[in-house]
Amino acid sequence: MVCADRVQDPGNTGAIIRAAEAAGATGVITTAGSADPFGWKALRGSMGSAFRLPHLRGLSIDQALCALEKGGVAVLAAAKDGERRYDEADLRGPVALVVGSEGRGLPPAVLERAAARLRVPLAGPVESLNVGVAAALVLFEAARQRGFRGAGGRG
């Protein structure tokens, strides 16, 4: 599961939904303030995944986190200064990756509430990744840990 909090660029929203489906995620949540996953640019970016992957939209981040926690899903936050590398976290259980807006990232309250804050190590002078790229890396790491091999076993 992936939760996009206030991801404003529809291309990024579509890319996150597409990566989530490609990695075998169970669904997507787009919070209030995020681009509409059914807008034309998001649909183009998702290449149809928005029609196939279950998702909720328009919830507040608090509502989304409450629903996940109530369902026994561990909330993991993507953060450039996260304390754990994304490829060193256990992503095999029921987890939801929360990614934040392009400019601001996740609010401190969300970071504090997360069971873990995950980072993607970067070579300098690069300071951050596109939110869709970061989400895809973590989603495919979760897929790898779960033994997902993709269509035809090609990876």
Image (tube, rainbow, N blue to C red):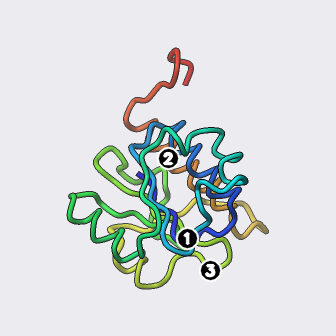
Residue 97, quarter of the rendered image: bottom left
For the residues marked 3 and 2, what is the alpha-carbon distance in whole angstroms? 21 Å
- Residue ID for mark 2: 139
Q: Earlier in the sequence, mark 2 or mark 1?
A: 1
Residue 74 percent location from the top left of the image: 29, 60
The extreme right residue here reads 125
For the residues marked 3 and 1, what is the alpha-carbon distance in whole angstroms? 7 Å
Who is closer to the viewer here, 142 or 53? 53
Q: Are marks 3 and 1 in contact (CB under 8 Å)?
A: yes
- Residue ID for mark 3: 104
Residue 98 percent location from the top left of the image: 46, 64
Q: Is residue 70 left or right of residue 94?
A: left
Q: Are marks 3 and 2 in contact (CB under 8 Å)?
A: no
Who is closer to the viewer here, 47 or 131? 47
Residue 95, quarter of the rendered image: bottom left
Where 109 sits versus 60, above or below? below
Residue 1 percent location from the top left of the image: 40, 51
- For the residue carrying disc 3, how many other residues have a C-alpha within 10 Å: few (<14), some (14-19), or many (20+)? few
Q: Amino acid at mark 2?
A: Leu
- Residue ID for mark 1: 100
Q: Amino acid at mark 1?
A: Gly
Tell me the residue at 72%/70% (across/down): 127
The quadrant of the rendering that contains the C terminus is top right
Tell me the residue at 61%/38% (across/down): 48
